[in-house]
Structure formats: structure tokens, C-alpha cells
Image (tube, rainbow, N blue to C red):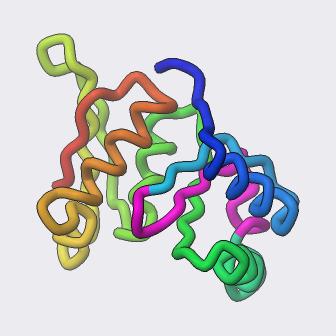
Amino acid sequence: MGPVTFNEDTLGYVTIFQNVTMCTVMDCVDTGDKIIFVVGKGEASRAIGRKGETVARVRLLLKRDIQVIEFSEKPEEFVANVFHAYDVKKVEIEDRDGVTHATVTVETTKKGRAIGKEGKNLRMARDLIARHHAIESVSVA
């Protein structure tokens, strides 16, 4: 886990997001089809706004889909926050032959979406989690 770095595009997204939401952005990832912002602990509800109004303003300004994830120092809590949209039931983190692995149990009807087409959502989640915690592998149950 090295320091999180931004390129020119993500730096611009962060500036707009912070100016609109007044929240601290700890990370910003452009996945191609959406921009993911990781905000400070306790700031997700302010970033989203009442009835989603604040994040909707950012979406209009950036003309892109937006996802907000709240940071946590606790690995289990951060993993749960990354998978929040899929109704997380539990998160288990274990060492498997020297590899730190997280198993996320989500609502059964949302498991397919959590994994995504050809594993795209799961890969994105794993990469995002690895940027902030020493977790190298993630599976959805």
C-alpha cells in the first residue's frame, strides 16, 4: 500500500467534488463508467446530501455517474462500506497461506451485481480496498 496518487483528471474531479460537498476526499478512482470518491469517516451522508441532492449536483457537473464510499481505518468496516449497495451481511478477514483475504457476504439476490459482469465490480472493489488496507484478495459469498 503506497500513497494514493491522483492524475490530472482525478485531481480535477476531487476539486469539484470537495467544492460542492465540503467533504474531504481521501481517494478518487475513475473506473471508466463511474467515478468513485472515498470520503473521510462520517462524511458520506453529507457528501450524498438530503435525498441525494449533493451527489446529484456533482453528477451534473462531471457528467458522470458517481459512487461515494466512506473510509474506515477498520478493514472490515471499509470492505463493508465498499459493498454497501449490496446489503452486506458480514465481512470476514483471514490469512490464507500468507495472503490476506476478505469474504463479503451480501444479500443473496444482489450477489451477481456485487460480482458484476465478468467480475468487473469485484475486481474494482478489490483494487480499491487494496489501496487502503493490506487485503490482497476479496470474494463475495
Q: Which residues are magenta?
A: 31-47
Q: Position of residue 61 (x, y in %)?
A: 72, 77
In magenta segment, residue 33: yes
Q: Position of residue 83 (x, y in %)?
A: 39, 58
Residue 105 sits in quarter: bottom left
Rendered residue at 32%/42% (across/down): 126
Q: Count the marks.
A: 0
Quadrant position of the C terminus in the picture: bottom left
Residue 56, how many percent across, how many down?
68, 83
Instruction: Judge whether 132 appears above or below 8 on screen.
Output: above
Residue pictured at 79% horizontal, 48% vertical: 24
Tell me if 5 is positioned left or right of 13 in this view.
left
As drawn, the residue found furthest toward the top would be: 98
Q: Residue at x 66, y 73 (%)?
A: 62
Q: Position of residue 25 (x, y in %)?
A: 72, 47
Residue 44 against residue 66 in the figure, above or below: above
User: What's the residue at 45%, 63% (across, down)?
Assistant: 84
Q: Is residue 96 left or right of residue 35?
A: left
Q: Is residue 34 magenta?
A: yes
